[in-house]
Amino acid sequence: MSENPARVAVVGAGLAGLRAATTLAARGCRVIVLEARPEAGGKAAGETFEGFSVDRTIQLLSFDDRRLLGWIGELALGERLLPLRAVTTAQLHGREIVRTSGRSLLDIARTPGVRARDALRLLRLPRLMRRYAPLLDPEHPERAADLDYRSLADFARLYLGRSVLERFVAPLATSATLGNELELSRVAWLLLWQAGREGQALPGIAGAGLHEVVRAAQELVDVRTDVRVEQLKELPQGGLEVDCATSAGEQQLCVEAVVLATSPREAHRVAAGVVTPAERDFFGGVRTAPRVTLSVGVDHTMVGLPQYVRVPHVENSPIESMLVEPGAPSGRAPEGNGLVTVSANTAVNGAAFAQATDDALTARLLEELDRVLPRAGRNLRFAKLHRDPEGAPRFEVGAYRALARFQRVQEDRRRLGRRLYYAGDYLAGPRLEDAVASGVRAAQDVFSDLGEQQVD
């Protein structure tokens, strides 16, 4: 390929698409990234506003996010974004924010609201994890398909008790997936728990928003925004034709391979002419949750470490979680100020939120913020609302079995010569690390099929 490098189109310029693109480009492919929106980044898009790094999602990372942290290093952003700033965890209990930890069974037992008799049942958790561990692979979540027949609520009530479900298990999963514990697969929680090395992996935040990663990646590959991909066509001689609509008119690109790093709904639309009925069924069954995020700049000194606060659904709050960041030199908020990023509870309030105006949503979330964090709610510099109707994959019961079937179809199609690949968090998991890992996996598959050595 070095003498005649393969041409690859990546559709979608979020973290998954950009990671696939930069990996492909580093191995010598001619890569073009097509993004329908006016800007790249997707869920990682953001801006610097009045000295604050304002993001569209809560960008909570982990010190064990090997793929994402390695990419930051490759992009020479270590001095800007690393080391991660440690984050403490807390939970809303009544009107009080109480610091919590999942680093040991004793810490979990001390979570506010966990009953003593249920705390004793936590002794089952290490044994359960040892039993399930062979099926749990964060980079290949479909391998857990055999565990995907019980909801998170049923699993936790059976083995750990109702109070552990409501106060520990469910908040961990729902804050990441924006789903409902009654519908979520237990696999979603098992993978999240394992990815945190059973509570040992500490959370952290980068020194600036991940829009810095997006900007750096754009300098390495050809990213074209405001380009809507209309359809894909398989070419008789191999490869694919990508039909696009731009402000300058229609355009066709002929490439050896295509990576679709879009939402499942958009992937379904774009690939409709080349996919099998089984693939169409898969895309039609993927469930996503709307995401509503409010970024609030606070005009007073906030002390202490950054804090990530989960809000159990039993609190009946419109807030799912929030990240509270005191200002720091060269940090995401100016020194002497603070930044609060609020993720709304769309699992419970989805219909009401979908119908509400931006102003009404902002007012409702600020009202709740003032209740749980009064100093933040009363010392505002700005409040910015972000809405995404397909903000998070929900991974409900059956999702991992469907994903296993989908991956088997992909293997069959690749053996038959189709050079179409997929990337995105809906194929991997709700974390930012999962999106990046899915981009790497797609690039590995491209290299494998085009006869190149796989990436590390």
Image (cartoon, grey):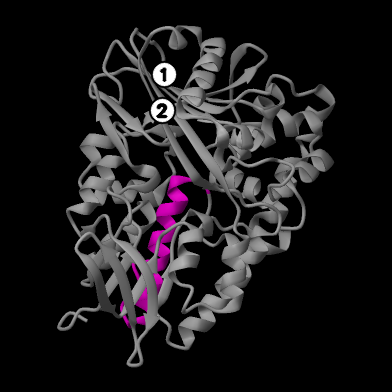
Residue 392 appearing in the image: yes
Q: Which mark is residue 305?
A: 1
- CB within 8 Å, label 2 to label 1: yes
Between residues 151 and 289, which one lies in front from this camera angle? 289
Q: Amino acid at mark 1?
A: Leu
Is residue 352 magenta-colored?
no
Disc 2 marks which residue?
Answer: 86
Between residues 34 and 400, which one lies in front from this camera angle? 34
Q: Quadrant of the C terminus?
A: bottom left
C-alpha span from label 2 to label 1: 7 Å
* Range of residues picked out in magenta: 430-456
State the image quarter where residue 299 is shown. Answer: top left
State the image quarter where residue 138 is shown. Answer: bottom right
Give the SS element for disc 1: loop
Above or below: residue 173 compared with residue 133: above
Q: Position of residue 256 (x, y in %)?
A: 30, 80
Report the side of 393 relative to 122 (left or right). Answer: left
Above or below: residue 22 compared with residue 114: below
**Nearer-N-terminus badge (2/1):** 2
Query: How many numbered discs sit on the rendered protein?
Result: 2
Report the side of 408 relative to 81 (left or right). Answer: right
Is residue 455 magenta-colored?
yes
